[in-house]
Image (cartoon, helix red, strand yellow):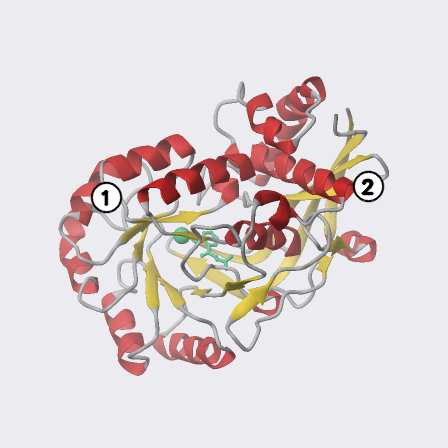
Amino acid sequence: MIPLDRISCYLVELPLVRPFETSFGREQVRRALLVRVSGGGEEGWGECVASSGPWYSYETVDTALLVIRDFLVPLLSRARPSHPNQVRRAFAPVRGHPMAKAALEAAVWDLYCRLTGVPLAAELGGVRDEVPAGVSVGIQPDLDSLLARVEEFVAQGYRRVKLKIKPGWDLEVVAEVRERFPDLPLWVDANCAYRLEELAVLAELDRMGLGLIEQPLWHEDLVGHARLASRLSTPICLDESITSPQRAWEALEIGACRVINLKQGRVGGIQAALEIQELASSRGVPLWCGGMLETGIGRALNLALASLPGFQLPHDISATDRYFREDIAEPAFELSPRGTIPLPRGPGLGVEVLPERLRRYQVAHWEFSI
Ligand code: OSB
Ligand code: MG
């Protein structure tokens, strides 16, 4: 049995070095719910990837806190797991709320790995000690600012650039970046901003030498994505639509995507992510690890997942200084000269939350006994 004594939640607000804008909104601060599970003289950390409002998905920091407190903590307390891979089953009575489940499950994985002295990546079967880093570039106030940002990231050595697009910030912008950087591996991410009726725009994008088009249509529209896929030669990658292993299977079964952006929080946690990894591997579907502007806690988890077989494309896992001036955990992640991020080597997530930083950035704190 994994010793579980106490569960704490912290709400932190970390200012972003630059605002991050997508088709659904603009963030200046990463408002993150962190979960700590203590037991056996160690502690494990998880980060909930939900944001302040229900824009990317229906979950928010507040719904996650409520679900953790009222439903998941009691379920975990009753289940008394002996391995973190049992937590997903313990949470099964709760429908939905994948990000809340993932945050608590992650903390249990970290605690378990720290108690056994094993890095999380090794526990999960990771096969790499560094992973290729890409960067996701938000919508900018104007084209010149975008070109300057892309230039900066290319000079730093990122292996590919993903541009956020939306109607009106698409063809001209992508064509310009493509012209200025003809050999750059370039992707676009619409965050659900188009409809199938806008096929003409998407068909233009199809001619711009993109590595993939991420989540062009509405998140619930798997069939629309399948129809679109049959009209485009650029692979469609799904993000928001893939909310569980079941949805991943459905999407692949009907040809709604050829690539999956895997975010463990969006699909319900590490165990769910491993199920999708198995499914994708059995069908030869390439995976890559997406990001949610996580602090060092969430990014350390993403690094561990990205080290698994089947994660083949550059990830939205960038260096710490791309997000924050100062993170909540150390060490900070740096881009290597090879355009990769090396995995931390310590047990569990391999990063340490600094109590002084936690105090500085926390805006609320809750304790639950278990
Ligand atoms: O669609 O991938 C997305 C951030 C917040 C919400 C949705 C997305 C993103 C990103 C950021 O693209 C990627 C990163 O963390 O570097
Ligand atoms: Mg996305």
How many residues crowd mark 2 within 10 Å: few (<14), some (14–19), many (20+)?
A: some
Distance from disc 2 to disc 1, alpha carbons, whole Å, reads 45 Å
Q: In which quarter of the image is the C terminus?
A: top right
The picture places residue 337, in percent across and down from the top left corner, at 55, 78
Quadrant, the N terminus: top right
Is 145 displayed left or right of 218 in the figure? right
Q: Residues within 10 Å of mark 1 (few under 14, many from 20)?
A: many
User: Which residue was labeled with disc 1?
Assistant: 225
Q: In which quarter of the image is residue 221?
A: top left
Q: Report the disc number at residue 130.
A: none
Question: What type is the residue that disc 1 sits on?
Answer: His
Secondary element under disc 1, as helix, strand or loop, is helix
Could you say which is closer to the camera, residue 47 or residue 283? 283
Residue that badge 2 annotates: 42
| Left or right: 224, with 155 as reference point | left
Q: Earlier in the sequence, mark 2 or mark 1?
A: 2
- Which amino acid type corresponds to the residue marked 2 in the rendered image? Glu
Instruction: Give coordinates of residue 159: x percent, y percent.
Output: 43, 71
The picture places residue 186, in percent across and down from the top left corner, at 33, 68
In percent of the image, x 23 and y 44: which residue is there?
Answer: 225
The secondary element bearing badge 2 is classed as: strand
From what the image shows, is residue 368 above or below residue 305?
above
Vertical order, 157 against 187 (above or below): below
Residue 190 coordinates in the image, percent (x, y): 33, 55
